[in-house]
Amino acid sequence: MRNVGTISRGIRTPIIKDGDDLVKVVVDSLLKASKTEGFSFRDKDVVAITEAVVGIATSNYATVDQIAKAIKDKFNSDNIGVIFPILSRNRFAVLLSAIARATKKITLQISYPADEVGNDIMDKEKLKKLGINPYNHVITEAEYQEKFGDFKHLFTGINMVNFYKDVIVKEGCEAEIILANDPRAILSYTNDVLVCDIHSRYETKEILRNNSKGKVIGLDEILTSSVDGSGYNTKYGLLGSNRATEERVKLFPEAGDSFVYEIQDELKKATGKTIEVMIYGDGAFKDPVGQIWELADPVVSPAYTKGLEGSPNELKLKYLSDNKFNHLSGEELNEAMRNAIKEKDKNLKGTIETQGTTPRRYVDLLGSLADLTSGSGDKGTPVVLIQGYFDNYASQ
């Protein structure tokens, strides 16, 4: 039996720039790390590459003016409703500048007491004390400033209502802000609506399209093809984009499928092993203090090799130890556990022996692990090597 289970290593690479041969950089960095750190590769190892460097290397960028042109071409409206954006200077502020350049007035509807991914917009306890029902009450900007205007986010120290208003006004656009959770509230102000939520976007668009006489378009429908030479993403549009500069964003990777298989092929040539490869963005986990649900990308992994399809099919060792094998101990217990794993059904879904295991896809679990390993700051490890993930207690 192996004495070590899953190992996750952040792999240092050179700084990735526009136009770099990322396949070569990733493979060379992995091979160099294996020599300096003294580890070897095995079949079913997983190499995860952050979406950020894939977008950079493939030059998948768009400028504010290119985005503004795309939005103006879609709407051609003097008053665009912008509904349910996440509260993020990195993720949405640059896009808001582009929207403001595409129209004369923005009616901005923000959800409360927090955005879709858990960023607070107000003091929740104060909201309760005031007896405001977030399910049906529309808060005007004046009411917000009167009752919650002193609120600042726990981590950033910024009031995003004020921040977003400043972004809009700076572009010479009129700003009107409301806080409401019913998508239909925006239709009292304008029928042309840009839907900006991520994971609930299909429901929001359906509700609005059933009630609006104007145009209802999602961020995932903007820049699905190139505009004036811009980058694009055919599936997610502007979703998953990040600030690059004040005038440019990096889009979610477009050429992911061919990329992961290229790396797999090159690693097979170099190591003789079949190594799975994936691109990862935000992990899917929640901060227990700030209450932020990390997943601001439309998916954890936009591209991965076929061997990463599926979900874990695992037994709960603690359950077996406390129940079926509670009369055993020592090596006899260990051997019984190993045999149970070897003989388990191929589909354990719904069985009592699996209770408490994590019913999520491999790519979501692995992507979350990779995101936590690489971090989002100055670690310089945009590549993560995960070994032993598909091992279990019975692995030799």
Image (cartoon, rainbow, N blue to C red):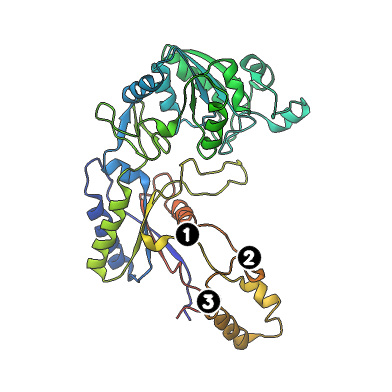
Task: Please name the residue that numbered disc 2 is placed on.
Answer: 350
Q: Identify which amino acid the numbered label 2 is placed on.
A: Gly
Q: Which mark is residue 362?
A: 1
Element type where label 1 sits in the image? helix
Quote the CA–CA distance across marks 2 and 3.
21 Å
The earlier-in-sequence mark between 2 and 3 is 2
Seen from the viewer's position, the closer of residues 153 and 216 is: 216
The nearer-to-camera label among 2 and 3 is 2
Mark 1 residue crowding within 10 angstroms, few (<14) / some (14–19) / many (20+): some
Query: x, y percentage for residue 275?
Result: 33, 65
Q: Identify which amino acid the numbered label 3 is placed on.
A: Tyr
Q: Which mark is residue 393?
A: 3
Query: x, y percentage for residue 206?
Result: 54, 32
Query: x, y percentage for residue 74?
Result: 38, 22
Q: Residue at x 45, y 81 (%)?
A: 396
**Residue 29, visible in the rendered structure:** no
Q: Identify which amino acid the numbered label 1 is placed on.
A: Tyr
Quote the CA–CA distance across marks 2 and 1.
18 Å
From the viewer's perspective, is residue 395 above or below residue 357?
below
